Amino acid sequence: MTEPQAGAAAPVSTAAALPTSCDVLVVGGGINGAGIARDLAGRGLKVLLAERDDLARHTSSSSTKLIHGGLRYLEYYEFNLVRKALAERELLLKSAPHIMWPLRFVMPHDPSMRPVWMIRAGLFLYDHLARREWLPGSSTVNLRQHPTGTPLKPGFQRGFVYSDGWVDDARLVVLNALDAQARGATVLTRCTVLAAQRQGSGWQATLQPEGAAPQQVQARALVNAAGPWAGEFLRDRARQASARSLRLVKGSHIVVPKMFEHDHAYIFQNPDRRIIFAIPYEGAFTLIGTTDVEIQGDPGSAQIDGDETAYLCEQASRYFAKPVRPADVVWSYAGVRPLLDDDSGDAAAVTRDYLLEFDGEAAGGSAPLLTVWGGKITTFRKLAEEAADELVRRLGGPAGSQRAWTRQALLPGGDLSAWIGAAQRPDADIARFIAALAQRHPQLPAAVRARWARAYGSRVSLLLADGAAPGAEVAPGLFECELRYLHAHEWARCADDVLWRRSKLGLHLSAPQREAVAQWWALNHPSTPTQPAPAPRQETSWN
């Protein structure tokens, strides 16, 4: 299925455009909320998505950025979760080859950790729990001869290699929101749902758009996809009770200068039975994470602490020949996972599966309330499909709305056929697309072409409509045409939205260069904020 061609529409961002009624009000602009809005809109329902901050402002831009089954979950007997996630990998990689791609992982064998037979058994299950069409299976490598052994300590002689995938997590959320909008949904950012209450056969919600007066919206159903704030929203805004609860588990990551030259990632086993990843990141860096620290209080204030930084450095240094030190960290971030409380004692053992809870009062179909508990990026599409199936069953809908449709659908920018012809393999397709983009726009620097191809896919045409010039270079590699596009079409409302979520250019730019972007924004979009509250992952100082 190709993507809809309505993606060039500008995002709704003003109170005047806020509808007074809808079929479903979705609260939360993370991956689950955006995915549910997209699925419902594609079935013909009138959907309104409200996010109080920027899309993917919190957990959904602070992940380890993996499309994976979760090899370590097999130790906790989470076979259903792993099977479900593995079945999604290739579907997702095909749907958006520009922002997702296959990645091979190397696990150096440490004899003091898990025995060889256990690792082989786990990888056999990983290879066979779900069907693979083109991702290669697992294998064993001699680290003394394989390039992935070069940066490791000489004591590591054997490694195990397997397949998973990488995703630009924040852009995945934006693409789902774009697709939802293209299919008729209204997407509002910087818009808080102050309260929601049942009224007759539906819901009356009070929405507070930024810089405008509160407005009332009527909805037939309400979806609580507030992530770490799901329990709080249910209790304080919707005034509903639930027997379910979340455990808020902070996962922190560090970014250091590139530790190796090859294109594989590592999975390291730690003495505490946890694992960490070391992943090629943004060309010049290595991403290392994550931790599992249970927190209390406001998830929005979570930050990496010194102990977590020291832990990640210590564990990575057990494997790398060159030690990783806290002083090497150029950037760090922390995200809070809203995990469904399953009474596990260890935060690392808490299930990563999800639960869709419809409250009892809505059992007869009157004013349904769906709360999304838990979940992970890899299973977002399946979660959204199951949520939409149940909502449509309860609400009814247009002819054909019962049919699930996202399994074979492409996300915006993922249809490259106009540039390269019929799709083949996602990794080969994106390489052909980058070559085609170079032929069509040789005037662009190669690094910019490659970044645009990865970020926007076929939507890159919207940045250079009718062959227009890219405009002034506001910061190295960042032209005015991209800033104008992101404001007009992708809900970017300040420099941080561009530098840390729509892209990771903030990692490559100096403080004066980032300030130049903020100045451009203040000059060209003075009505939108230029200094939002700092994200919890931007506390690290810059050189």
Image (cartoon, rainbow, N blue to C red):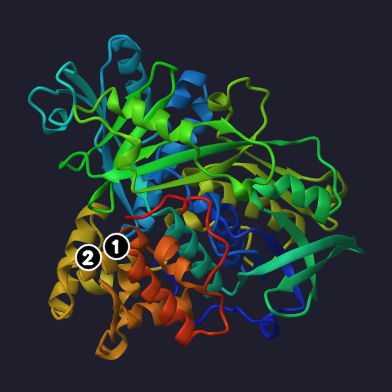
Disc 2 is placed on an element classified as helix
Query: Is residue 543 in view from this perspective?
Result: yes
Residue type at numbered disc 2: Ala
Quarter where residue 347 is shown: top right
Residue visible at 45% across and 80% down in the picture? 521
Determine if residue 7 is in view.
no
Who's the residue at 33% across and 70% down the image? 513
- Residue drawn at (73%, 36%), measured in percent from left and top? 245
Q: Secondary structure at mark 1?
A: helix
Where in the figure is residue 529, as x and y percent of width and height?
56, 75
* Residue 505 position by quadrant: bottom left
Q: Who is closer to the viewer here, 74 or 314?
A: 314
Q: Tell me: 239 left or right of 87.
A: right
Residue 537: mark in rendering: none
Count of numbered circles on the image? 2
Q: Which residue is mark 2?
A: 450
Relative vertical location of residue 474 with respect to residue 340 in this rendering, above or below: below
Q: Position of residue 366 (x, y in %)?
A: 85, 57
Residue type at the position of mark 1: Arg
Q: Residue furthest left?
A: 145
- Left or right placement of residue 468 versus residue 31 in this view: left
Residue at mark 1: 454
Contact between marks 2 and 1 (CB within 8 A): the answer is yes
Could you classify mark 1 by the number of other residues whose Cα lies within 10 Å: few (under 14), some (14-19), or many (20 or more)?
Answer: many
Give the quadrant of the C terminus. Answer: bottom left
Work out whether 534 lies above or below 167: below
Cα–Cα span, label 2 and label 1: 6 Å
Q: State the quadrant of the N terminus.
A: bottom left
Q: Position of residue 230 (x, y in %)?
A: 70, 48
Is residue 60 left or right of 99 when viewed as pictured? Answer: right
Image point (75%, 36%), residue name: 244
In the rendered image, residue 138, in percent from the top left (x then y), is placed at 25, 28
